[in-house]
Amino acid sequence: MDEFLDNLPDEELLIVEQLRTLIIECNPLFKEKLAYNVPFYALSKNLFFIWPASIPWGNVPQNTVHLGFTQGHLLPDPYNVLESGSRKFVRIIPLTVDEAIDVEMLRFYIFEALEQA
């Protein structure tokens, strides 16, 4: 994980660190692992991932980090922020480096994903 973080541009690193902290605050039992060279978070199965633009095969727009939900199709979307991911069930929330992170909104989706797990 340290090598992954060391290779991120500063703007992406800030978002990734905020997301990692938020996810672990929501449930300290999450297991963090690298898959596809990005962090995934799991309990009994993968629930979330963080995909920065600097990981080239993710097709993430420049200056953006995606918070992905592996079973996002099951989530309610009252904030109307979930976008279809690269796979059928995946949904993502794109976060750009120049926008403030809405922690309460993200916390809502994280807890909803936990209920679906």
Image (cartoon, grey):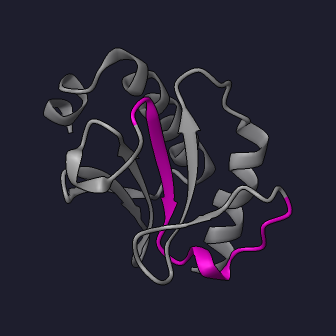
Identify the residue at horizontal 57%, vertical 80% (top origin): 117
Q: Does residue 74 appear left or right of residue 56 in this picture? A: right
Identify the residue at horizontal 47%, vertical 83% (top origin): 88
| Position in image of residue 115 (x %, y %) | 68, 76
Image quadrant for the N terminus? Answer: top left
| Position in image of residue 75 (x %, y %) | 70, 74
Circle count: 0
Would you identify the image quadrant in which residue 6 lies? top left
Would you identify the image quadrant in which residue 73 lies? bottom right
- 75 over 6 or under it: above or below: below
Q: Does residue 92 appear left or right of residue 87 in this picture? A: right
Q: Does residue 94 appear left or right of residue 85 in this picture? A: right
Identify the residue at horizontal 30%, vertical 55% (top origin): 58
| Position in image of residue 63 (x %, y %) | 43, 29
Q: Which stretch is magenta?
A: 62-78
Asked if residue 33 shows in the view, the reply is no
Identify the residue at horizontal 50%, vertical 82% (top origin): 89
76 inside magenta stretch: yes
- 39 over 62 or under it: above or below: below
Asked if residue 9 shows in the view, the reply is yes
